[in-house]
Amino acid sequence: MQGALWTGFQRAKEENFNFFRKNCKNILEIKSFCLPLQCQRTTDAADTAAKMNKEMEKLNYTTREINRNFKIKVSGQFEGHKIHTLVGVTGLLKIVGDTALTNRLLDRAFNTMNDVEVCKLRRGLRISFYVA
């Protein structure tokens, strides 16, 4: 029974592929066959990724350099919820929300001689940079 379902699924997948290959000249036409919600989600994801790439370019340090040297932990209130979690560079940018402030925090972390540098923001966030 399971094998029959699998072959049916494979056949349906191949039929869809053949339909697109025969009727669509380029990838844009294939996207027009998508459900509107799916197309919107992929567009939003692409816009978000492009926006984050622009923010990453404004940092004084590369993400590789930051992630190699530090474990970043964020604690406190964020958007009405208590958080206490490890984040990467992208998560730090999303939570802090400002590239200039993130650069100041990173400068402070790279210039410290301690094992941990704790930065407290007025909005109730505590960002800890642990030397990896």
Image (cartoon, rainbow, N blue to C red):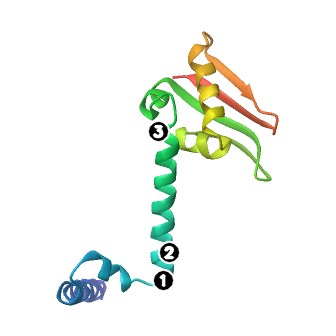
What residue did someone put label 1 on? 36
Q: Is residue 108 above or below residue 39?
A: above
Front of the two marks 2 and 3: 3
Q: Is residue 62 above or below residue 35?
A: above
Label 2 residue SS: helix
- Asked if the residue under mark 1 is in contact with the one under mark 3, i.e. CB atoms within 8 Å, the reply is no
What residue did someone put label 3 on? 57
Q: Position of residue 46 (x, y in %)?
A: 45, 61
Three-letter amino acid code of the residue under disc 1 = Pro
Question: Would residue 83 appear left or right of 23 to someone viewing this image?
Answer: right
Kindly identify which numbered label has been placed on residue 40.
Answer: 2
Q: Is residue 116 above or below residue 86?
A: above
Q: Residue furthest top?
A: 113
Kindly identify which numbered label has been placed on residue 66.
Answer: none
Looking at marks 3 and 1 on the same chain, the residue that comes earlier in the sequence is marked by: 1
Measure the alpha-carbon separation of dots 1 and 2: 6 Å
Label 1 residue SS: helix
User: Is disc 2 surrounded by few (<14), some (14 to 19) or many (20+) residues within 10 Å?
Assistant: few
User: Is disc 1 surrounded by few (<14), some (14 to 19) or many (20+) residues within 10 Å?
Assistant: few
Q: Is residue 51 above or below residue 37?
A: above
Examine the image and state in which quarter residue 131 appears: top right
Three-letter amino acid code of the residue under disc 2 = Gln
Examine the image and state in which quarter residue 112 appears: top right
